[in-house]
C-alpha cells in the first residue's frame, strides 16, 4: 500500500516547503544520507587502492552500490559506469565514440541541451547533425527519425521523457528503427530512470545515460552510463584507477567499468545512490510512476481550465507540467509561488531552448512531481496559480 505520509518522513525538508522542482533534482531520503554519513564517520578511504580494512570496506560498498543500480535497471554491473551526472554520461559517449568528418548523427529538437549540444559540437570536426522536429506536444514521430537516417549515420540520440513537455517518446520503436538500420542508439534517461520502469535488457539500447540525483533519489554529483558494448567507446580520461600496467613508454588499460572511472571516484555519492536505489526498490517504481503521473495529469487538467494559463505537453504525460500565466515572465511566476505560497518550481528554458524556440514559447514555469508530493500540495499549487492569474488580469 503506497503511503505518501510515511514516505515523507524520510525527507525532512518537505515540512518547510512544497517542493515541485523534482525534474531538476530530487530530495535525498534519510537512508541514503545515513549511508553517506556512515562512509564519512566509519570507513572513508579510497577505492581499490589499498589492502587495508577501510579501503576494502569502501571498495566493497562502492561496488555494492553499482550492483544495486545495475540490477534496478536490469543491466550487468560491468557495463554500468558511475559518472557525475547525465551530462557527463552523454559527453563520455560524444567524446569517446570517435566521430570523423562526414559522419552523421540524428537527434531531435525536444532534447535537453545535454543531449543536443555535445552532438552539435561534433560539427566542429565536420560531422553532420540532423535535429528532427517534434509535434506541438513535444512528441517525436519515429518516422521523422527514420527519414533522417543516411548511410553515414553513426548514432541516434533521443531523450526518453522530455523535461519540458513530459512527453514520453516511443523509444522502443526508435530503438528498433536504429537497429534495423545497423545504427547504435543512445537514450537520455534523465527524466525516466526512477520515474518509470527501465529494463535495459529488454530495451536493448546501446547507451543509456541517467542522473543519480533525479528519479533515482541519489545525491548530486552522481549519474550513470550504461554501455552495451564498452569497446565501442574510448575512455575520455585515463590515469589512476584505469591502468593495470605501465612503464616509461606504454600502459595497459583495465577492463570496464574501471577503464571509464579515472581518478578517485565519488565514493560517498555512489554509496548514497546505492542506498537511494534500494529505498526506491522497496517502494516500487510502478507505484511511484502511478503516483507521480496521477498528480501531474490532474494538475495539467486543472491548470488548463484556469483563465489565462497555458499548459504544454500531451495528455498522456509523465510527472511534470510546464505552463505560463498570461504574459508574466516565468521567473516572476516562480518567485511569487516561492514568496507567497512556499512553493518551489523551476522557471526559464529548462536547458531546452531549441524546443521552445521551435514552438515560439519564451520559456515557462514547471512543476515536476516526485514520490513524496501529495494531493494537498497539488491543490495548494493549482490554487496559487489561479490566484496569480487572477491578480495579473488587466
Ligand atoms: C532530459 C534531460 N537530459 C539531461 C539532463 C541533464 O542532467 P544532469 O543535470 O544530471 O546532467 C536533464 C536535467 O534536467 C534532463 O532533464
Image (cartoon, rainbow, N blue to C red):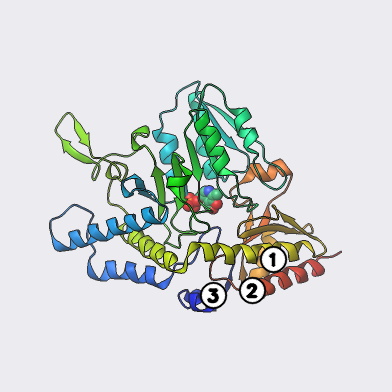
User: Could you tell me which secondary element the residue under label 1 belongs to?
Assistant: helix
Q: Nearer the viewer, residue 366 or 303?
A: 303
Q: Which of 73 and 40 is in front in this view?
A: 73
Which mark identifies residue 298?
1
Residue 275 quadrant: bottom left
Please state if 30 lies on the left or on the right of 326 as rendered: left
The residue labelled by disc 3 is: 4
The residue labelled by disc 2 is: 375
The answer to whether residue 159 is seen in the rendering is yes
- The answer for how far apart the CA atoms under marks 1 and 2 are is 9 Å
Q: Which residue is drawn at 56% across and 38% down?
A: 174
Q: Where does residue 60 sit, x and y in percent of width and height?
A: 23, 59
**Image quarter (top left, top right, bottom left or bottom right) of the C terminus:** bottom right
Residue 136 quadrant: top right
Q: Residues within 10 Å of mark 2 (few under 14, many from 20)?
A: some
Q: Are marks 2 and 3 in contact (CB under 8 Å)?
A: no
Q: Do the residues labelled 1 and 2 touch (CB within 8 Å)?
A: yes
Label located before the other in sequence (2 or 3): 3
Label located before the other in sequence (1 or 2): 1
- The answer for how far apart the CA atoms under marks 3 and 1 are is 17 Å
Amino acid at each position: 500500500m503506497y503511503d505518501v505520509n510515511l514516505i515523507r518522513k524520510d525527507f525532512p525538508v518537505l515540512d518547510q516547503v512544497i517542493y515541485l522542482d523534482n525534474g531538476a533534482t530530487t530530495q535525498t531520503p534519510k537512508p541514503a544520507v545515513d549511508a553517506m554519513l556512515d562512509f564519512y564517520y566509519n570507513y572513508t578511504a579510497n577505492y581499490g587502492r589499498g589492502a587495508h580494512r577501510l579501503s576494502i570496506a569502501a571498495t566493497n560498498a562502492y561496488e555494492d552500490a553499482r550492483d544495486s543500480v545495475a540490477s534496478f535497471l536490469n543491466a550487468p554491473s560491468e557495463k554500468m559506469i558511475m559518472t557525475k551526472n547525465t551530462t557527463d554520461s552523454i559527453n563520455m559517449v560524444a567524446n569517446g565514440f570517435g566521430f570523423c568528418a562526414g559522419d552523421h548523427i540524428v537527434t531531435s529538437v525536444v532534447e535537453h541541451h545535454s543531449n543536443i549540444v555535445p552532438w552539435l559540437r561534433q560539427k566542429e570536426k565536420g560531422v553532420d547533425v540532423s535535429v528532427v522536429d517534434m509535434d506541438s506536444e513535444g512528441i517525436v514521430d519515429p518516422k521523422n527519425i527514420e527519414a533522417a537516417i543516411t548511410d553515414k549515420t553513426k548514432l541516434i540520440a533521443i531523450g526518453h521523457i522530455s523535461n519540458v513537455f513530459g512527453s514520453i517518446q516511443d523509444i522502443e520503436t526508435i530503438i528498433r528503427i536504429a537497429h534495423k538500420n545497423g545504427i547504435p542508439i543512445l537514450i537520455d534517461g534523465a527524466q525516466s530512470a526512477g520515474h518509470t520502469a527501465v529494463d535495459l535488457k529488454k530495451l536493448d539500447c546501446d547507451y543509456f545515460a541517467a542522473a543519480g540525483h533525479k528519479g533515482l533519489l541519489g545525491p548530486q554529483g552522481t549519474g550513470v552510463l550504461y554501455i552495451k558494448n564498452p569497446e565501442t567507446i574510448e575512455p575520455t580520461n585515463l590515469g589512476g584507477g584505469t591502468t593495470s600496467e605501465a612503464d616509461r613508454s606504454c600502459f595497459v588499460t583495465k577492463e570496464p567499468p574501471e577503464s571509464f572511472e579515472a581518478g578517485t571516484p565519488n565514493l560517498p555519492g555512489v554509496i548514497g545512490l546505492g542506498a537511494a536505489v534500494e529505498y526506491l526498490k522497496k517502494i516500487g517504481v510502478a507505484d511511484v510512476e502511478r503516483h507521480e503521473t496521477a498528480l501531474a495529469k490532474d494538475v495539467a487538467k486543472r491548470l488548463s481550465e484556469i483563465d489565462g494559463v497555458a499548459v504544454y505537453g500531451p495528455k498522456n504525460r509523465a510527472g511534470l507540467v510546464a505552463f505560463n500565466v498570461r504574459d508574466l515572465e516565468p521567473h516572476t511566476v516562480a518567485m511569487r509561488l516561492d514568496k507567497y505560497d512556499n512553493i518551489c518550481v523551476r522557471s526559464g528554458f529548462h536547458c531546452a531552448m531549441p524546443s521552445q524556440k521551435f514552438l515560439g514559447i519564451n520559456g515557462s514555469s514547471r512543476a515536476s512531481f516526485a514520490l513524496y508530493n501529495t494531493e494537498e500540495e497539488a491543490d495548494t499549487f493549482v490554487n496559487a496559480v489561479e490566484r496569480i492569474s487572477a491578480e495579473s488580469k488587466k
